[in-house]
Every structure is written in C-alpha cells, then in structure tokens.
Amino acid sequence: MIRRPVVAGQFYPASASELKAMVEVMVKEDVGKEEVIGLVSPHAGYIYSGSVAGATISRVKLKDTLIIMGPNHTGAGKPLSIMTEGKWETPLGEVEIDAELGKKILANSKHLEEDDKAHIYEHSIEVQLPFLQYFKPDFKLVPIIFGHPSGATYKEVGREIAGAVKELGREVVIIASSDMSHYEPQASAQKKDTQAIGAILNLDEDELLKRVAEFNITMCGYAPAVSLIVAAKELGASGAELVKYQTSGEVTGDFSSVVGYAGIIIKGGGE
C-alpha cells in the first residue's frame, strides 16, 4: 500500500515548493555531520518544533535505511505495529519501506505485529520524513508505532531491532519520534523535561521509565526512546548529546501552557 500524508497542509505545507522552502530555513547546512546510531526528534507542527528537528537532523550522516519509531496518538491498530511493505508519500515524494529489514525485525520479535491501521492516521513518523528527504531523497524506511504495553516490552523490542540489524549487517540510523512535556507552565515543563533528557543522555532506559512515572512526565514518545536507548547500546553506543531544546512558548509567547521539544543524537563507539 501507499501510505498517504495526513497532516500535510496542517503540520507542514502541502505544496512541495513551500515545504522545501520551510525546511530549508530550519536546517543548518554549515554544521559538520556525524556518524550516529540514533536520535530523538520532535513531531509537532513545524512552526513549533521544526527548528529543533532541523537542527538535530542536520548533524546526522543519514544511512540508506532509517528505522523510525513513534507513539500511537490515535489508538488505532495493534499495540506494537510494524509495516514491512509499501511506500510512504509526502509532498516531496515517496519513501519505500525496507522490506528485507522490516521482515527480519518482525521475524525476530515476540511483540511486533504486521499492521498498517496504526500508521494510516498517525503523524509521529510522517512529520520526520520531509526533513530526512531534504538531505537524502533516496533512503528506505522501517516504520514502527508503539501503543502502551510495558517498559519491559519496549526494552525487548529494542533488543529485537538491534538483533535484526546485526544479522543483516545493515547500517541504519534509528529515530525515536517524541515531543516532551505537554500543556504545562514553562517552568514546570522545563524542570520535568530536564529529568527525562538527563536519563536519555546517560543512555539509561530504566531511569527514563522511572522518571516518566515518578515525575508524571507527559513525554508522548518515551516508549520509542526506551527502545532506541536499548537498541543503540546493543549496537555500540558510547554517548549522547542534546542538540537543542525549546518549548512552544518560545514561539507563541504564551508560557502558561507549553509543549517541550528536544533533539538528541546518540553516537557510536568511534566518536
């Protein structure tokens, strides 16, 4: 199937020329690109989070295959959903699914199920694609959507993904699509987000799960972030770096109820 865009014209422009022009302003062409195993990138409307996503993806040497994991905002589909065939469309063109790697991850997994229903109306993966297409028009995709099973399950999925990548000898970049705290005063959001970001920078998936629960952090993509940390460590991660953090308040001027956005890269042993 071809998965059509659902938030073009809402989260970002529906016109290819307008979209490319908008992305162009938000990326940084003059920064050095690094070998990374993975990254965390936000998925709100581009006027709010695009500068964070753009700054983060600008730092990355993209590979031919990108595994993108996002949270399920719609409640549709299976609890842990992967698509292993088809294409995703944006105004900038089509992105083919890496069927070989997708099927290997699915075969390795006790938890993931083949399912497109969770993906059809979910924006968290779609919003990443134009930034990635801007820098690398010919990459392939493995899309995975997380519902709400358990922390132990998220960790196992991370190990299953890393195992499949190793078995195929594939070079990939793994992306966890997530916004941070939702609809809290600026000071509260920043305080909570600092806790979650700290756990990610320490590559400590258990601490991230603990802090999300303890501090009631409304980070929508904490599950993909947990899987990313586990997979990245299995693939040789050595450290992480916060590229950029901001809130919607810094765009709107309304600091009474903000959403936080963080861009983080996870580096390999060679860094």
Image (spheres, rainbow, N blue to C red):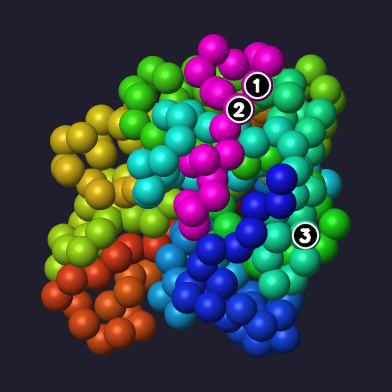
- Nearer mark to the viewer, of 1 and 2: 2
Work out whether mark 1 precedes mark 2 in sequence or the reverse, and give the earlier one.
1
Which residue does the numbered mark 1 point to in the structure image?
106
What is the span of residues highlighted in magenta in the rendered image?
106-124
**Label 1 vs label 3: CA separation?**
23 Å
State the residue at coordinates (64%, 59%).
4
Q: Amino acid at mark 1?
A: Leu
Q: Amino acid at mark 3?
A: Glu
Work out whether mark 1 precedes mark 3 in sequence or the reverse, and give the earlier one.
3
| Residue 104 left/right relative to 187 | right
Q: Are marks 1 and 2 in contact (CB under 8 Å)?
A: yes
Which structural element holds mark 3?
Answer: strand
Q: Percent position (x, y) of residue 56?
A: 58, 62
Give whichever of 197, 18 is nearer the camera: 18
Which structural element holds mark 1?
Answer: helix
State the residue at coordinates (61%, 84%).
22
Q: Percent position (x, y) of residue 65?
A: 77, 43
Q: Which mark is residue 114?
A: 2
